């Protein structure tokens, strides 16, 4: 019985350290950006040793992914809910991309390294979580496109078409994150979605509802 209590305390202590590390990293990344934040600063703010930070995120990029995954997860679910009520395919696609669009607008210093690590970074548990989020968004885009896509005319299956749309829009989001977005960046994104859909032979009709999994 005493062993169970000791293990319980140990797990609670680990969870508390993880909470402090995640909150401190999120606060520092938001305040001064990824490039100017060090793992030593995170450790000091969380009141843990720097080595403890690396137990939960083995590298600084993994730490960023850990923090932003937690922020993006509920927003991805919210995007699916908004897409299910969208008035057109284009609006539904933009709703699904909204978490990344908003990240680029609100945290440009973090969005660019985040997307770079997701797309090209080294393997790690938090990157795998990020890739799962990306796959979730792509699958939702595919669900929106499926009833409207003529795969033969487009020359792409629905999954390929969804990934093509996602990749093209991520490139636009990256431009914004590195300070190269036009003044009306959302207008440009909306126009880009229209061009992509027309190129795939998708009419901008009301989309099929995107089913939001129960929490």
Image (cartoon, rainbow, N blue to C red):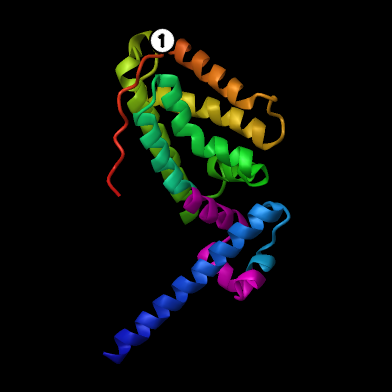
Q: Quadrant of residue 197?
A: top left
Please tell me which residue is depicted at 54% across the width and 21% down the height of the picture.
190
- Residue 176 drawn at (x, y percent): 65, 32
- Residue 97 drawn at (x, y percent): 48, 33
Give the quadrant of the N terminus. Answer: bottom left
Please tell me which residue is depicted at 56% across the width and 35% down the height of the picture.
101
- Residue 148 drawn at (x, y percent): 33, 15
Instruction: Reply above or below: 13 against 123.
Output: below
Instruction: Reply above or below: 163 against 70.
Output: above
Helix, strand or loop status at disc 1: loop
Please tell me which residue is depicted at 43% across the width and 41% down the height of the picture.
76
Q: Quadrant of residue 6?
A: bottom left
Relative to residue 166, is residue 7 drawn left or right?
A: left
Residue 39 in sight in this render: yes
The secondary structure that dominates the magenta segment is: helix
Along the viewing direction, whichever of 15 and 3 lies nearer the viewer? 15
- Residue 63 drawn at (x, y percent): 57, 58
Q: Name the residue under label 1.
A: 201
């Amino acid at each position: 019985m005493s062993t169970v209590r000791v293990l319980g305390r140990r797990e609670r202590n680990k969870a508390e350290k993880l909470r402090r590390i995640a909150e401190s990293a999120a606060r520092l990344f938001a305040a001064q950006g990824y490039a100017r934040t060090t793992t030593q600063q995170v450790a000091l703010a969380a009141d843990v040793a720097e080595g403890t930070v690396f137990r939960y995120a083995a590298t600084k990029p993994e730490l960023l992914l850990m923090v932003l995954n937690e922020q993006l997860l509920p927003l991805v679910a919210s995007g699916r809910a908004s897409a299910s009520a969208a008035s057109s395919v284009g609006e539904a696609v933009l709703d699904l991309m909204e978490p990344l669009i908003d990240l680029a607008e609100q945290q440009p210093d973090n969005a660019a390294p985040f997307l770079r690590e997701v797309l090209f970074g080294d393997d790690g548990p938090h990157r795998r979580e990020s890739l799962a989020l990306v796959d979730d968004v792509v699958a939702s885009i595919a669900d929106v496109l499926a009833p409207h896509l003529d795969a033969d005319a487009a020359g792409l299956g629905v999954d390929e078409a969804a990934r093509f749309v996602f990749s093209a829009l991520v490139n636009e989001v990256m431009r914004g994150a590195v300070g190269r977005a036009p003044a009306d960046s959302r207008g440009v994104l909306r126009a880009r979605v229209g061009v992509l859909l027309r190129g795939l032979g998708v009419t901008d009709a009301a989309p099929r509802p995107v089913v939001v999994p129960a929490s």
